[in-house]
Amino acid sequence: MLKYFIIICVLLAILISCLGQKSKVAILYSYYSDYKWTINENNGLMENLDSQKYEIRNYYLDSKKQTQKQWLHEQCPAILAKIIDFEPKLLIVFDDNALRCLEKFAIMPDFPILFGGINKNPNSYQIKAKMAGVVGTIHLEESLELLTKLGLPNTNKVLITDESETSKFFLEQIPLEAFEEVVVENNFAIWQQKVLQWQRSDIDALCVLLYHALRDSQGNYLPPQQLVNWIQENNRIPEIGFFDFSIEAGLLCGVTTSGYEQSKLVGKMAVTYLEDGTFPTKKIHHYPYGKPRINIGRARELGIDVRKLQNWR
């Protein structure tokens, strides 16, 4: 009798231990933790992924401030080693540099990967693990329509962006022939020169893609808000931004890609897999919905009446 009692106690102890063990989730972000896009991704993910229910560890590549390829090559092996030691049930990666990291250092064990914020075709990455997730979209036509609804012309438009890998991938989605000029540059002084030059031309729409890899004349990293502040002070051409954080920072308007909304969808996929083991059968999910955004303060500065948009969408 005592023997059976001991066996039952051992089995109960094992059961209690298993019930108390949280599923492990590793999250690999391409950028730094206080980058607005990363914050939005994290907030959207945590709408569904309960940190009290799962054991979650975050890892950051910091590849927005540190744009040199050598930096990524040095960071990836150490971070991937930490993830492997953690032994997660699921790995979630955000943005292309994280997938590029996995591709180059293909030492990952066989746990599935969910991705978000990817701009390049995920099928182009040579990663053998089971993968699925959400890709981003640039809403150029919708953003131009938003300018039209504001009563603003956009016949002669220019596009300016930094030289980051993210910019290069997004540029592949955009019909560049639609612009009078396209500038891809990390040098802040050249941005200043171009924007001031356009003030003296017939350009009527300034499209700003990304500006998070800019450097000043000494080669130092330029905080993104500093660039937006300079544009606000020196530019009178209506601006289009393509991301939530750009409009929040002070650019005029845009139908934006939301890291928050994409990540909410990734979070739903993650919970489904963690709870019942069901992994998405469809690999690539497009989040097609852009969000019309207007910075009211900037509209006032430019003398734009936003009441014209009252009945739009």
Image (tube, rainbow, N blue to C red):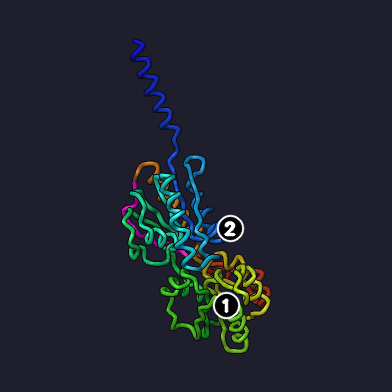
Helix, strand or loop at disc 1? loop
Which residue is found at the position 41% from the left and 24% from the top?
A: 13
Which amino acid, by three-letter code, is at mark 1? Asn
Q: Residues within 10 Å of mark 2 (few under 14, many from 20)?
A: few
Mark 2 vs 1, N-terminal side:
2
Q: Is residue 123 visible?
A: yes
Label 2 vs label 1: CA separation?
A: 23 Å
Q: Position of residue 148 (x, y in %)?
A: 53, 78
| Residue 67 or residue 287, whichever sits in front | 67
Q: Is residue 44 left or right of residue 284?
A: right
User: What predominant SS class does the magenta segment belong to?
Assistant: loop
Helix, strand or loop at disc 2? loop
Q: Residues within 10 Å of mark 1 (few under 14, many from 20)?
A: some
Q: Position of residue 16 (x, y in %)?
A: 43, 28
| Residue 277 or residue 100, whichever sits in front | 100
Which residue is found at the position 46% from the left and 70% from the top?
A: 165
Q: Which residues are magenta?
A: 278-289
285 within the magenta span:
yes
Q: Position of residue 171 (x, y in %)?
A: 44, 74
Q: How many marks?
A: 2
Q: Which residue is mark 2?
A: 34
Q: Is residue 44 above or below residue 153?
A: above
Location of the N terminus (image quadrant): top left
Q: Residue furthest top?
A: 1
Q: Position of residue 63 (x, y in %)?
A: 50, 63
Q: Which residue is mark 1?
A: 187
270 within the magenta span:
no
Q: Is residue 149 visible?
A: no
